[in-house]
Amino acid sequence: MSRHRVYVARRLPDPAMDRLRQHVDMTVWPTDELPPPREVLLREAAVSDGLLSLLTDRIDGALLDAAPRVRVVSNYAVGYDNIDVAAATSRGVVVTNTPGVLTETVADFAITLLLAVARRVVESDRYTREGRWKSWEPLLFLGQDLYGATLGLVGLGRIGTAVAKRAHGFDMRILYHDVVRREDLEHDLGLEFTSLEDLLRRSDFISVHTPLTPQTRHLISTDQFRLMKRTAVLVNTARGPIVDPDALYRALADRQIWGAGLDVFEVEPVPADHPLLRLDNIIVAPHIASASVETRTKMALMAVDNLLAALGGQRPSNFVNPDVWERRRI
């Protein structure tokens, strides 16, 4: 019996690649630094039974129409805003993702950014490397304390909850805003539910953990920055377009807020000439919040297992559009 053919849009950790090789014939985009161009994705999808995609790969109706053999799109990410899920569902294509496995690692990184911005770690590292450190100074690189401060969580899903648990170690007061109120977590973690506007006014530190939807695009923009304290620190490890980059630049350049830490951007990779990169009160990272060896390997294995299950006629563990599977059973 012939084996299924799969296109993998980027090289994954070796354990996942080895597992795939055992079960399918696969083609892998060979360049780590750049995603496959659209024409390559179209060409490979047309002769594939399954796709293992990344956030950088646009999977839309036009691509799926050109790929009648594709039965499953396994996204190597929790988010799936790169995929037109409605288009996939209408064509009977299974879509899966990798939730849960990266929760703790991303939460660690959110706290890392909060601390690094508050304590001006990158600025002081650069200052030292440039040979500018001459003496201990009472006013050198004064920062902000996390301990005892107020943290505002915009979104209280898995990652937001994990950040809240870590914030307890800093004895922080924790506010949150979400479309769903979690009274169980309020009781267990001592959280306070409030409006977005109230959260922005009261928080010393703000961490974004909401999904990207039409409603959350530029959720944090000019009006929201005006509500924040001048000492506020904003961190985003969710999705770039949730924060309006132009409004963020103005808020940072005018010292309307203390600083920011971004792991995600509206356009990725962020252009080298982007004005945000000229500021000294922002830390920028290249979308690495989940980048630990253990977590990225677990993500890859989960994506592979989702893909193989769907191709083998078994229900994947992590569905984005379970209605497709239910319709197949009828």
Image (cartoon, rainbow, N blue to C red):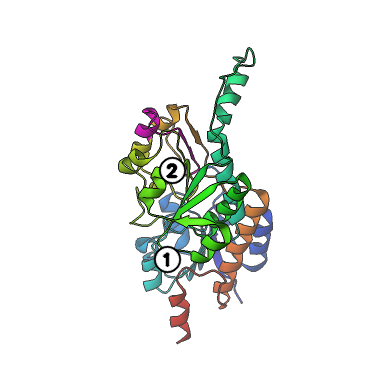
Q: Quadrant of the C terminus?
A: bottom left
Q: Which residue is mark 1?
A: 67
Q: Amino acid at mark 2?
A: Phe
Of the numbered discs 1 and 2, the one sitting upstream in the chain is: 1
Instruction: Name which quarter of the figure residue 82 lies in.
Output: bottom left
Mark identifier at residue 265: 2
Residue situated in front as seen by the camera: 244 or 184? 184
Observer able to see residue 31: no
Q: Position of residue 40 (x, y in %)?
A: 45, 53
Residue situated in front as seen by the camera: 211 or 29? 211
Indicate the secondary structure of the residue bearing disc 2: loop
Let me know if residue 192 is in the magenta part: no
Q: Residue at x 68, y 53 (%)?
A: 294
Q: Residue at x 42, y 35 (%)?
A: 271
Q: Would you call the spot at circle 2 few (<14 residues within 10 Å), some (14-19), or many (20 or more)?
A: many
| Residue segment shown in magenta | 249-264
Instruction: Name which quarter of the figure residue 101 lies in.
Output: bottom right
Indicate the secondary structure of the residue bearing disc 1: loop
Q: Position of residue 13 (x, y in %)?
A: 65, 53
Q: Quadrant of the N terminus?
A: bottom right
Q: Residue at x 34, y 32 (%)?
A: 250
- Most extreme residue toward the left, as rendered? 223
